[in-house]
Structures are given as structure tokens and as C-alpha cells.
């Protein structure tokens, strides 16, 4: 049987990297498989997917705009247009199965596949499912989820706990802490904090760090600070005179950042949380409070309830974040306990599991 897969979705790294990991796993199992991605024009996947060596077609669709109703007026037209685009792509590519990873383009692609009786598979990365995935889940062949307890969103009989696929460069990372710290010109004898707030940056995390750089220095701590794009030069100026801080807009090889870090400050997107589990890092999470259905807080609480991470609320970050990190840095026993707990929550080889299950369902 000829395997032709369409993988739909994107919008953020949290959707794109798992999608690419699943594509690679399918290719490993079936080298002759043909894989086509469908994304949203103007979004990050249009750049990242070709870099990973796959073809992508973009739909002219933007998501529902929560802040401006006026901007939603064109949405019904865009949805109709995207269904027409999807129909054309399907007629040319003739997929045998379709996989949705979440994000704008997932809905029209999987909806169309389901109307044509083509098997559909969903990967839901968060511990709180998005609305369109809940709708699509009713007719999906299999639904892969990151964590237990997702029966409230999806039909139980088609549900499989797979975990989240992680970028191979991070999962199979053999860097030593020493080499990683040398990469940032930092001192291997000091406790090192890695702060990441996503590609655009996290204002609350960045502002909290900027306000308390002195305390980090006074407590003999080092900081690897990925600021993201927004106001990057402001934060770079603030940190310029500190020898204990590496500051930059983006860390291209995140495996170095993780390998150097003793403690990680991060948002609680699904991918970030999964990477922290797989790598077994002591983590202080600052969930982004305006994520859809507040899913970042739900992701973080799964770890907090198991003693695997510490949560600092976004609104309280400026006062509490650095103090919380210093307290954890001064308590090596607590760091080890949390690393042990967070490791227990890791599901490894998720991409291989998903690929095997898809191929089994089709055979």
C-alpha cells in the first residue's frame, strides 16, 4: 500500500516541532512514504518545515481574533476559501491518512478528510484540549495525548497516551555541562539559570530578571537569558555590564542552553514542559495567563501537583520570580528531588509510538 500522509497544523514551535518529529518517525519506518505539510500562510511553519526538508502548502487562514471583532468579519470567507484550497490539495496529493497537530490549518484539513472518509489522527499536546480538536476528535481514528485524564475531551476508545514528540537534537543530547557553559563563556563552578520565554519573549519573565540582576550576582548565580524579539535591545543593555549573564534574543542550539542549566525559568507551553520532563530539569514555570483556555496553567499544574516544578503567577513574577529561583538555587536537595519527580513524568520516544500506531491502524 502506498503511504501518503498530510500533516496539518502549526502556528507555534509547540505544534511544528512535534509535527516534524512525527514526519521523521514515519519516514524512518516507511522510507517510501510521501509527506506533505499544510500550514497557515505567514506563520512560522512556512519557514521551519522546508528547513526540515519537507514540502508545505499554506492556507489563507487566520485564527479567530479574540481582541478585535472587526478583524473576524473576514473569517467566514477565509474559512470557505481555505476549504476550497484544501479540496484542491487533496485532489492532487490523494492522501491515505491525515494527521493534525493543532493550530489554524488543522481544522479545515481534518474536517475535509473526515467528510471524505480518509482516516484522521490528532495529536493534542496540551493537558487542556483546544475547541477544534475536541470537535475533530469525535470522528478521528486515533487521538494521541500528552497526559492521562483526557477522557473528558475525547472518546475514550480512541484515546492513546503518547507523550509529546521532542526534537531529536534535545532528546539525544550528549553535551556535557562543561562544554555547554564554555559555549556561553560562563563559569562551570557557578549554579546556572536558563531563562526562556518563547520566540517572541515573555515580558513578565524579562522584566522580573531586569529588575533583579543585582540579586542574582550577589548570590553568585549565572544567567543564560533568551529574551526573545520584543524589546531585546533594552534587556541586552541592562545586562551588558554583568559578567555572570549571557544575554541574547534567541538561542539557536537550545541543547546547549539546557545542558548548561541547573535551573530553568520557562513559560508552560506543552513543548517546553515536555522538554523539561525528558531532560529532568529543576524548573520554575511562569504560565502565560492569556493562552487559549488558560492551558499553560493546566500544563504547569500537572507538574506542580506531582512536586515536579514550582509555579510563579505571571502577575506576581516581578516580586517573586527571582526570589523563588534564589531559594531553589540555595537548596541542592530540593533541586535533586524536583529533578527526580519531573523525570518520572517524561514519556520518551513519543514520535515513534505515534508513527507505529498510525501505520498499524492503516494496515
Image: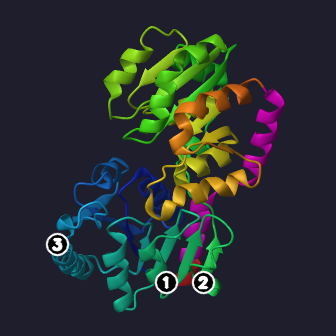
Q: Residues within 10 Å of mark 2 (few under 14, many from 20)?
A: some
Query: Helix or strand or loop: what does disc 1 sit on?
Result: loop
Task: Check if residue 257 falls in the magenta segment.
Answer: no
Pointers 2 and 3 in contact (C-beta within 8 Å): no
Spatial CA distance of label 2 from label 1 is 8 Å
Residue 191, position as x, y percentages in the image: 68, 20
Seen at 45% across and 8% down, the residue is: 241
Pointers 2 and 1 in contact (C-beta within 8 Å): yes
Seen at 51% across and 43% down, the residue is: 315
Residue pointed to by mark 3: 73
Q: Main secondary structure of the magenta part?
A: helix
Spatial CA distance of label 2 from label 3 is 36 Å
Q: Earlier in the sequence, mark 2 or mark 3?
A: 3
Would residue 88 be found to the left or right of residue 133 on screen? Answer: left
Q: Earlier in the sequence, mark 2 or mark 1?
A: 1
Q: Is residue 60 visible?
A: no
Q: Nearer the viewer, residue 126 or 83?
A: 126
Q: Where residue 140 is drawn, which disc sits there?
A: 1
Assign the N terminus to one quadrant of the image: bottom left
Colour mode? rainbow
Residue pointed to by mark 2: 158
Task: Check if residue 337 falls in the magenta segment.
Answer: yes
Q: Earlier in the sequence, mark 1 or mark 3?
A: 3
Look at the image and give the residue range highlighted in magenta: 331-359
Residue 272, position as x, y percentages in the image: 55, 47
Query: Helix or strand or loop: what does disc 3 sit on?
Result: loop
Q: Is residue 181 above or below residue 41?
A: above
Residue 290, position as x, y percentages in the image: 44, 55
Q: Is residue 155 above or below residue 93?
A: below
Q: Nearer the viewer, residue 145 or 177?
A: 145
Q: Where residue 259 is drawn, which disc sits there?
A: none
Amino acid at each position: 500500500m502506498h503511504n501518503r500522509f498530510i500533516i496539518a497544523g502549526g502556528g507555534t514551535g509547540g505544534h511544528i516541532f512535534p509535527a516534524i518529529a512525527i514526519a521523521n518517525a514515519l519516514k524512518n519506518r516507511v522510507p517510501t512514504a510521501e509527506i506533505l505539510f499544510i500550514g497557515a500562510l505567514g506563520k512560522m511553519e512556512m519557514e521551519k518545515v522546508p528547513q526540515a526538508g519537507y514540502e508545505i502548502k499554506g492556507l489563507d487562514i487566520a485564527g479567530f481574533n479574540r481582541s478585535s471583532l472587526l478583524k473576524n468579519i473576514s473569517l467566514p470567507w477565509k474559512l470557505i476559501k481555505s476549504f476550497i484550497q484544501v479540496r484542491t490539495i487533496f485532489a492532487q496529493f490523494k492522501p491515505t491518512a491525515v494527521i493534525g497537530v493543532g493550530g489554524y490549518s488543522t481544522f479545515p484539513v481534518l474536517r475535509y478528510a473526515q467528510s471524505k472518509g480518509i482516516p484522521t489522527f490528532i495529536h493534542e499536546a496540551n493537558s487542556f484540549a483546544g475547541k477544534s480538536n475536541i470537535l475533530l476528535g469525535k470522528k478521528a481514528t486515533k487521538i494521541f495525548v500528552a497526559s492521562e485524564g483526557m477522557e473528558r475531551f475525547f472518546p475514550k476508545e480512541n484515546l492513546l497516551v503518547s507523550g509529546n514528540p521532542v526534537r531529536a537534537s534535545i532528546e539525544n543530547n550528549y553535551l556535557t555541562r562543561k562544554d555547554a557553559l564554555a559555549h556561553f563563556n560562563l563559569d562551570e563552578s557557578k549554579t546556572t539559570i536558563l531563562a526562556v520565554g518563547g520566540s517572541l519573549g515573555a515580558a513578565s519573565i524579562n522584566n522580573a530578571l531586569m529588575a533583579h540582576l543585582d540579586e542574582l550576582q550577589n548570590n553568585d548565580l549565572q544567567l543564560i537569558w533568551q529574551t526573545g524579539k520584543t524589546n531585546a535591545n533594552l534587556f541586552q543593555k541592562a545586562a551588558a555590564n554583568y559578567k555572570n549573564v549571557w544575554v541574547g534574543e534567541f538561542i539557536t542550539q537550545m541543547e546547549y542552553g539546557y545542558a548548561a542549566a541547573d535551573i530553568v525559568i520557562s513559560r508552560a507551553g506543552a513543548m517546553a514542559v515536555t522538554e523539561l520532563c525528558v531532560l529532568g530539569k529543576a524548573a520554575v514555570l511562569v504560565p502565560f495567563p492569556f493562552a487559549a483556555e488558560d492551558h499553560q496553567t493546566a500544563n504547569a499544574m500537572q507538574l506542580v501537583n506531582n512536586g515536579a516544578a514550582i509555579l510563579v503567577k505571571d502577575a506576581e513574577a516581578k516580586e517573586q520570580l527571582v526570589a523563588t529561583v534564589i531559594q531553589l538555587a540555595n537548596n541542592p536537595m530540593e533541586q535533586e528531588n524536583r529533578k527526580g519527580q519531573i523525570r518520572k513524568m517524561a514519556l520518551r520516544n513519543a514520535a515513534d509510538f505515534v508513527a507505529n500506531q498510525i501505520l498499524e491502524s492503516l494496515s
